Amino acid sequence: MTSEKSASPDRDDINEGRIVSSRHLVSERCAELSELEYALIMTSNAFNKWMVRCMTAAGEPDMGAFDVSLLHHVNHRDRKKKLADICFVLNVEDTHVVTYALKKLVKAGYVTSEKAGKELFFSTTEEGKALCMKYRDVREACLIAIHAESGIAGKSIGETAQLLRTISSLYDTAARAAASL
């Protein structure tokens, strides 16, 4: 992509092979980031929709995507977790969002909280664990079955996950820089 072509307001992203949602953000220094950002938006929305539909099929129609991911994280490795650790691992800056979602999960009977000293620890109840396993069954029947037919190698998915974690650090660093402006 030449800088002359990049500077043109009439350039055609489709003819250049770029699929973006915000052409005005495309940078001649790294147009690929705009492609990635659009793919992240699409993937994020599809993944959120999937989590909600999967959880509904598992028997719980009243959870949002964040609630679903939070329940699975609390259930992860069957260990009690502190709020700060949950926020850190899920990369959520606003602890109030996590606190509110945890309260909803506690009220629904899927998560329990236990005070130890000054810390509050969260873990899944038996009902929460059972729901996570029902979710897993639906995931196996729907998502894993489709993946098997897709032809996408598991190794490629793992490499993509590693790349996305690395890219996440770019956005975290950029967010810190923007916050200091």
Image: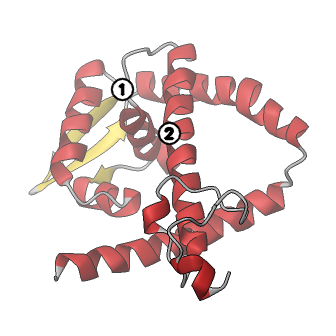
Q: Is residue 181 above or below residue 75?
A: below
In-front residue for pair 139/25: 25
Q: Is residue 101 above or below residue 109?
A: below
Q: CA distance from mark 1 to mark 2?
A: 25 Å
Q: Are there few (<14), some (14-19), or many (20+) residues within 10 Å of tag 1?
A: many
In-front residue for pair 79/155: 155
In-front residue for pair 48/33: 33
In this picture, residue 122 sits left or right of residue 6: left
Q: Amino acid at mark 2?
A: Asn
Secondary structure category for the residue under label 2: helix
Q: Are there few (<14), some (14-19), or many (20+) residues within 10 Å of tag 2?
A: few
In this picture, residue 173 sits left or right of residue 38: left
Front: mark 1 or 2:
2
Query: In which image quadrant can residue 140 be found?
Result: top right
Q: Quadrant of the N terminus?
A: bottom right
**Residue designated by label 2:** 45
Residue at 58%, 63% (x, y): give it: 36
**Residue designated by label 1:** 110
Residue at 86%, 40% (x, y): give it: 150
Residue at 57%, 56% (x, y): give it: 20
**Which mark sits nearer the N-terminus, 1 or 2?**
2
Q: Quadrant of the C terminus?
A: bottom left
